[in-house]
Amino acid sequence: MRSSEKAQRAIERLSEIKPYKIAGPVEVKVEFTTMAGRVYELREGVERVNERTWAFHGKDIMEAWLKFSSF
């Protein structure tokens, strides 16, 4: 089956597929490959774990991810 046929089949079955939900509260932990070169502002729901790792807490995955993406 070609990729385009698989894609068409998936679109036709879209109503059968339920979204994956992550129950909150959640923590998104990000480990940078090097030490952070700049100083980040700590704020509610943001925690520095060590010199390379930060944790972002939220009531759900979207809230935690938005804290990271606006970091």
Image: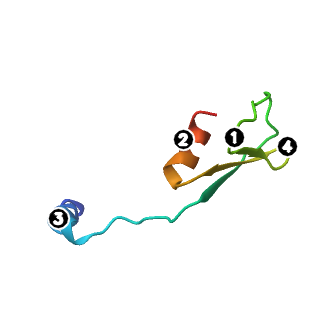
Residue linked to disc 1:
44
Mark earlier in primary sequence (1, 2): 1
Q: Secondary structure at mark 3?
A: helix
Choose between 15 and 2: the one closer to the eye: 15
Q: CA distance from mark 1 to mark 2?
A: 13 Å
Mark earlier in primary sequence (3, 1): 3
Q: Disc count in the image?
A: 4
Mark earlier in primary sequence (2, 3): 3
Residue 70 percent location from the top left of the image = 58, 33
Residue linked to disc 4:
51
Residue 43 percent location from the top left of the image = 71, 36
Residue 58 percent location from the top left of the image = 59, 51
Q: Amino acid at mark 2?
A: Leu
Residue linked to disc 2:
66
Q: CA distance from mark 4 to mark 3?
A: 48 Å
Mark earlier in primary sequence (1, 4): 1
Look at 56% across and 54% down and name the residue there.
59
- Tags 1 and 2 touching, CB below 8 Å: no
User: In this rendering, which labeled residue sits more in front, label 1 or label 4?
Assistant: 1
Name the quadrant of the C terminus. Answer: top right
Q: CA distance from mark 4 to mark 2?
A: 21 Å
- Tags 1 and 4 touching, CB below 8 Å: no
Residue linked to disc 3:
5
Q: Amino acid at mark 3?
A: Glu
Look at 52% across and 54% down and name the residue there.
61
Q: Secondary structure at mark 1?
A: loop
